[in-house]
Structures are given as C-alpha cells and as structure tokens.
Amino acid sequence: MKLKILVVAGDGIGPEVTHEAVEVLREVAELGGHEFTFTERRIGGVAIVQDGTPLPADTLSEALASDAVLLGAVGGNEFNSLPPDKRPEAGLLKIRAELGGFANLRPAFAFRELAVNSPLRPDIVDGADILFVRELLGGLYFGAPREWDKATGQAWNTMRYSRDEVARVARIAFKLAQGRRKKLTSVDKANVLEVSQLWRATVNEVASEFPDVAVEHQYVDAMAMHLMTQPRHYDVVLTENLFGDILSDESAVITGSLGMLPSATIGGKVNLYEPVHGSAPDIAGKGLANPLCAILTGALILRHSAGLETEAHAVETAVRKVLEGGFRTPDLARGQLNVTAAFSVLSTKGMGERVRQTIKEQLLAVRS
Ligand code: NAD
Ligand code: IPM
Ligand code: MN
C-alpha cells in the first residue's frame, strides 16, 4: 500500500503532537511493508511569519497532490488582534474549502480506562461512543455577507445553507449510522432559525432513504445538556458547522480531555485529518500536550485513506492498552486522591513512544 501524506503541523502544540502521530504511522508502515511518504509544509501563524500568508500557494498545491493531509493546529496569541481573514485560522478555513471535504467526522469515544479520570461520574461516561458528523463548509463560517462596520458600530455574519449542502452531509451521516447502532440525532435550532427549519426538513427527507436508521431531532441548547447527562444515548450526531464546533469540544468532557478527540474530513478531493483541539498556547513547547488525539487521527488516516482497517484498529487498541497500563499525560491524570501514585504521568514524547512500542508488540503477535 502506497500513501502520500502531507503534514502541516502548524503552531503551538501542533508540531509536538503531529510528530508523534507521524512516528506511529511510520512504525505501522514498516511493520506492514507499506510505503508511506511524508512531506512537510507550513500553515497558520508560522506561515504568516515566514511567508506572509496563513496558507502559502505551495502548501495548497502539495495538499491537492497528496492522498491525505495531516494537520496539527493553528493559532497563537500574537495574532489575536488581526481581522479574521488575516489570522492563522483563515489558513485552516481556506485549506478546508479548497480540499472540499464537507463531512467532518469527530468520534468521541470514552475509553473505559479513562472513566475514573473524567469530570463526569464513571457510570455516566462508561460505554459512551458518539460519532459527530459536523458540516464543515457552510453556515456562519462561510456565509456572506459578513462584515464589521466600524463606522456604524455594527457587525454581521450570515448563517446560510442550501438544501443540497444539508442533504449531502446528512446522507453521509445516515450511511455511517447504518454501519453502527442505526441511530441518528440531528441538532438544530428550528424553534428560532429558518436555516434550522430547512435543515430539519431536509434531514427528514433524506431519512426516508434510510428506513433502518432511527432519527430524532434535538434543539442545540437541550443537546448541550443531554450530552453531559446521557452520553450513552447517542450514536451518530449530525450538526451544522458552528453547533458541531461547540458540541465536539464539549464532548471532551466525556472522553476525559480535548487531547482525546481525533477528526477526519471526507467527501472532497483530498481527505483532511486534524485533531479537534487547537494550538494550546498555554502548554506549547513544554512536552505536556497529549499526543493521543493526533495518534488517533493517524488511525483515521489508516481507516479512511489507506483502507487499512486492521492497522487502524491496532493503533486504537494500542492506545487502550497504554491507558490500561496506567499511563497518562497530565491532562488526563486527575480524578484520584493520589494521582501520582495511581498513574505514571508521561510527556508528549513518552506517550508516543509507549504507543509505538505497544503497536509493535501487537502487530508482531498477530503475525506470529
Ligand atoms: P485549545 O484547544 O488550543 O486549548 C483549550 C484547552 O485545552 C487549553 O487549556 C489547552 O491546554 C488544552 N488542550 C488542548 N489540546 C490539548 C492536548 N492535546 N493535550 C493537553 N491539553 C490540551 O483552544 P484555545 O486555547 O481556545 O485556542 C488556542 C488557539 O488554537 C486559538 O488561536 C484557536 O483559534 C486555535 N484553534 C485551532 C484549531 C485547529 O487548528 N484545528 C482548533 C481549535 C482552536
Ligand atoms: C476546530 C476549530 C476551528 C473551527 C477554528 C480554529 C477555525 O475550532 O477545528 O474545531 O472553528 O472549525
Ligand atoms: Mn473547535
């Protein structure tokens, strides 16, 4: 199997966690005799500083010529006063738009071993396994008009969707639900917004193509609460762009940390893979970042771009085994009276190394 992967590590903890994911993918390739090639390019704040733009043309052309793009994170406090179209985040939005993937899959899986570390009670989170399908190219993020009119002291953005944009992402969500527990929850604000009324009507139309999937609708405010009180109730959760952004970060409480949420964006020219978290300026450069989100994002590359399900599963199982062994990064090490006695706390690199070692043992055991 040959795969050309473009790595755009970006800012803050992006390069730290991405490095660990790449090393895991290299290990998998070596063990399985696959040929993965990795090319690196700049995006985000680092590209603003070095190239004068958050998405250099050369990064975009390399991305379009690759089989998969692995992104770390973008953003930094020094760019916070820039207007939206000049910020590092603009580079991320542009690469998303150019690659064309509109279905952002954000699995929130509560590893049993982490139930003791969750801010929620173990009996609430244990067994939770949600797949968020976030629409990624529409809504407020891309709708026009948008402006901050400083003269009049007003600003506006536009939440806009077409029926086709809703239908295409809904279809992907229903198909994914068919391969899981056959339940789909669509999130909207149809009690207030016309866009949400269109959203709900379209989801109901698409639902008739998938009679084996049970559909329910939830208002986004109630959903934010239900997610915390009954996360096990949900299977596939379909959302528009901004609601999905917010609810997926909230689901970090279910998984134990933002450092446990991977993502894959499909449906476009080239799939884009990125952890859900940002550049985490508060912990960047200190070896404190949890690389498991990036490593689990690597597993999604194996699943969705390489078609290597056994290897994807092996990576996820290795993560589980490492957690079972009591290894934690600092963000996960909580919830016990004596945390240091209960867990071995590892650095970003230490955690990456543990996962690689475990994958090696596992894949070699499968072969012998
Ligand atoms: P953030 O996700 O960077 O961090 C939120 C909190 O979670 C911080 O306390 C951080 O330390 C912690 N955290 C995040 N990832 C972690 C990890 N892997 N291990 C341990 N702890 C982790 O969100 P923020 O602070 O609101 O944003 C910082 C910058 O990142 C902003 O510029 C924002 O726009 C950007 N951002 C980028 C992306 C992306 O590139 N995909 C996503 C979200 C935010
Ligand atoms: C995410 C991030 C991005 C988003 C930002 C950085 C543009 O928060 O991937 O969740 O809002 O989509
Ligand atoms: Mn977000």
Image (cartoon, rainbow, N blue to C red):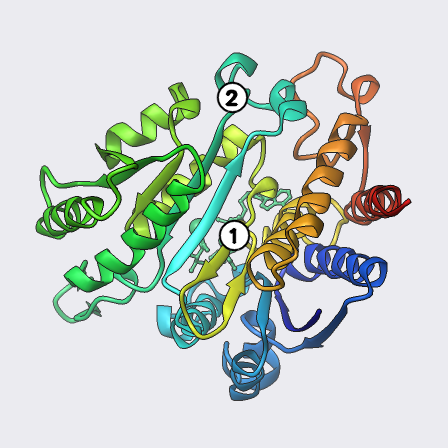
* Residue 148 drawn at (x, y percent): 22, 67
Amino acid type at image mark 1: Ser
Between 40 and 368, the one nearer to me in the picture = 368
Instruction: Examine the rendered structure and indicate whether residue 287 appears above or below residue 268.
Output: above
Q: Which residue is mark 1?
A: 263
The residue lying at 64 percent from left, 59 percent from top is 14
Label 2's element?
helix
Amino acid type at image mark 2: Val
In what quadrant of the picture does the C terminus appear? Answer: top right
**Mark number, residue 125:** 2
Label 2 Cα crowd, 10 Å radius (few <14 / some 14-19 / many 20+): many
Label 1 Cα crowd, 10 Å radius (few <14 / some 14-19 / many 20+): many
* Residue 83 drawn at (x, y percent): 36, 70
The residue lying at 64 percent from left, 25 percent from top is 114
The residue lying at 53 percent from left, 14 percent from top is 121
* Residue 99 drawn at (x, y percent): 44, 74
Q: Is residue 252 left or right of residue 360?
A: left
Instruction: Examine the rendered structure and indicate whether residue 68 appears above or below residue 219.
Output: below
The residue lying at 36 percent from left, 49 percent from top is 175
* Residue 211 drawn at (x, y percent): 24, 39
